[in-house]
Amino acid sequence: MNPRRRTVPRGLATTAIALALAGLVVALDVLFPPPLPAAGVALSPVVIDTSGRPLRAFPLADGRWRLPVDPNEVDPAFLRALLEIEDRRFFSHPGVDAWAMLRALRDALAAGRVRSGASTLTMQTARLLEPRPRRTPGAKLLEILRALQLERRLSKQEILALYLTLAPYGGNLEGLRAGSWAWFGREPEALAPEAIALLLALPQAPEARRPDRHPDAAAQARARILRRLVAAGLMDHERAAEASAEAVPTRQAFPAHAWHASARALAEAGEAATVRSTLDLRLQAAIESQVRALAQAEGPGVQAAALVVALDGRAVVAAAGSAGRDRSGGWLDLTARHRSPGSVLKPLIYALAMEDGRVTAGTRIDDLPRQFAGYAPGNFDRRFRGEITVATALQQSLNLPAVQLLAAVGPARYAAALAVAGTPVELPSGGADEAGLALALGGLGITVADVAALYAGLGADGRIQPLAWTETAAAQNRRRLGAPLVSAAAAGQVLDILRDAPPPPGRLPGSLLSQAPAIAAKTGTSWGFRDAWAAGVVDGHAIVVWVGRPDGAP
């Protein structure tokens, strides 16, 4: 038989077998894909301020801290060291480093035991995505196959980002950012040599080298990494010696600025790894400091809350939900609790009366004893001024004129106006009619946030919009006109009256308002001195401050 004739079928058979194997590999790859979640791995949300500074991080539901990592935002020195220690040929191999495997096999045969590993960063990422309780040959083979699958689906940068997000750093810490924050209190964008070395050592044995539990082991592992970096020419001897001499760090708290406001921003954003809030960290710190000082000055058991809202987009630029979580009731977001507003909503009654054409700033009105169907309100100082202007009545926060105007406007219309504006209020069980004219003097419940929204509406030509805690919501507000509460003319008249008012004697509730120029401000005190308020509009912002006890006691 002609040998050439036999060669052709053999070649065809070889090709067919190769194609079949390739098809089998592809089929298995499709049928058994790597465990890459469709929506990505679950991440701890981080709320940032308008400049990108972290405000507060939130753990996952199971208590783990896992923060997203972008390799472009990691110290390049750390990335160079990572590749030197873990995977020198990361950017050239297909997920498995054959040379490293041969070296590891040679070392193991020479020593009679495993001396060095050959796991690439891709293989380690595969193991992190699909952890197994035991390191068996079968598990190693699966790890290799998964690494090859990852390389087919992801870019090198995506694999690196995934590794940096999932690498363990001891306890409930996952990912480089979580490790950097917890052990060094900072982002990994600029790391000292001692931080680089420890953050490289921890994923190799995260529990055995935890600095808070095993400081000696952590220090020794860090020193070994430093020596390897010196040998690789990535660090000089002197700097490595200095880094080795540094104390092993203790665990630090994650960022927890704007505790309550960050939670509001996260709730508004829904599921998001990074939430860009409307808050400004520097102003937030100042507000928190002022509110804390105010509550401390008032004595134990007293709390305070404050909001600063930009009229543009109704962006909340600073918010203190309490004077501190170490004070009674401090864990509550007191900007969201319904309290009696006292006189702080009187400007709205005046604005409604002005919109109806019933009064102007110069209209004369009586401040004299009077009964309204058995209801006989008095003034705070128990004095009456006689005939005065509407402007004077509002500036001095007199009760009789406010009740008269509410009687003219109608309690039901006043409550309806608040409802139309999107501001929910708590009314007695019988509704506005039963509450009657007491609404003028605080006979309803409203939150600090809603008072801020209303004052922001007065400052924005009488139109109300919901407060925005995220940049996305603020941008949406800017595209909308807002719901009408009162006319622009009525809102302007009321603000002019308040701007012309002399400052009240003594200190305003909080020095937040004391330095503000030309502020249109109003104070309020609820019955029994349970709540003290100050609210105003100034320089394109609405500001509200509340002081009281969380349980409503006097």
Image (cartoon, rainbow, N blue to C red):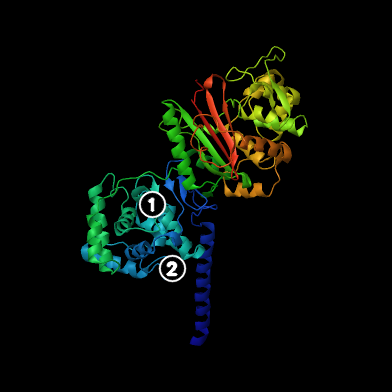
The residue indicated by pointer 2 is 94
Picture residue at 32% right of the left edge, 58% below the top = 192
Residue 430 can be seen in this image: no
Tell me if residue 60 comes above or below residue 369 in the rendering: below
Q: Residues within 10 Å of mark 2 (few under 14, many from 20)?
A: some
Q: What amino acid does circle 2 point to?
A: Pro
Q: Earlier in the sequence, mark 2 or mark 1?
A: 2
The residue indicated by pointer 1 is 186
- Secondary structure beneath disc 2? loop
Picture residue at 66% right of the left edge, 49% below the top = 478
Q: What amino acid does circle 1 point to?
A: Arg
Front residue of this view, candidates 466 and 231: 466
Tell me if residue 62 comes above or below residue 17 in the rendering: above
Point out residue 297 in the picture as x, y percentages from the top left corner.
Answer: 42, 30
Point out residue 441 in the picture as x, y percentages from the top left corner.
Answer: 63, 23
Q: Residue 396's image quarter?
A: top right
